[in-house]
Image: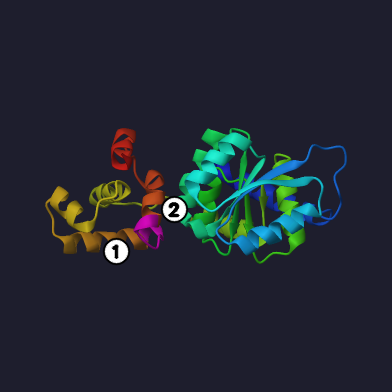
Amino acid sequence: MLSLLLPIVETASRMSNQGGESANLEPTERSPITVFVCETQPIVVEGLKRVLDAHPDLVLVGESTSVQEALDDIGTREPGIVLIDQSLGVKTTFEMIPRIRARSLHSQTVLWVSHLTEVESFRALQTGARGILKKTLPVSSLVECLRAVGRGNIWIENSISNQVVGFLNRRTMPRLTPREQEIVSLISRGMKNKQIADRLSITTGTVKVHLMHIFEKTGVKDRFELALEAHRLVAIDPEERESASA
């Protein structure tokens, strides 16, 4: 998966560089790109409306502050782009991306973020996001991103694409012991230290020591990130994953 994603990230970076030169050019003879926004702050939505009103090729067709309401509206409106605010939560956002595609197959997702870590950026692309846009970027970048994704391209701001490429270059497959692999697998199923200790007939202190070694070997920072990376680190039975999420 890492080797497959790296060319996409590099291509996205080139698109970002090329697109910047023509961001202010109005497309001609194209159907408008419809946009739906999931945003918790009304003042931000109002600002987005004003920006899109100034560009006839970009049309805001809906807005929502909740996940379920957004999914229902997206299924009905089938927008070309769904712009998701990071304030919904990283985990919620990642879970929402495939659900959007299930409701509206041609809708593409753009994450509108204040900050994403390297692993979060990688995970967003892996989950199916077609754009990652920082809220600190100028309006021209917002317009450029929406147009690029609306035409079927991937758009990533340069600093983020550099982070992801750096992340991919640094990540090598760590050698975990059989016991460490067991713990990673159980972490991916949502188990806590006490549950893992009981399952493996060891103490919670021993579990913590194993986790410390796993974090050191893999470079992950916390249990959530470890759960996201578990499929890469160990072989996980799909049936176990389904039972954990049930």
Span shown in magenta: 217-224
Q: So how many labels did they put on this image?
A: 2
Q: Which mark is nearer the camera, 2 or 1? A: 2
Kindly state the secondary structure of the residue where label 1 is placed: helix
Question: Dot 1, crowdedness within 10 Å: few (<14), some or many (≥20)?
Answer: few
Kindly state the secondary structure of the residue where label 2 is placed: helix
**Residue at numbered disc 2:** 91
User: Residue placed at 34% from the left, 34% from the top?
Assistant: 238
Relative horizontal placement of residue 104, taking residue 227 as reference (left or right): right
Question: What x and y, as percent, mark residue 225?
Answer: 40, 56
User: Residue placed at 58% from the left, 40% from the top?
Assistant: 74
Residue 81 included in the magenta stretch of the image: no
Which quadrant of the structure image shows residue 78? top right
Q: Amino acid at mark 1?
A: Met
Q: Nearer the viewer, residue 160 or 103?
A: 103
The residue positioned farthest toward the left in the image shown: 201
Q: Which mark is residue 120?
A: none
Q: Nearer the viewer, residue 214 or 98?
A: 98
User: Residue placed at 37% from the left, 56% from the top?
Assistant: 224
Which quadrant of the structure image shows residue 141? bottom right
Q: Amino acid at mark 2?
A: Lys
Q: Is residue 8 visible?
A: yes
User: Residue placed at 53% from the left, 52% from the top?
Assistant: 122
Question: What x and y, as percent, mark residue 80?
Answer: 67, 40
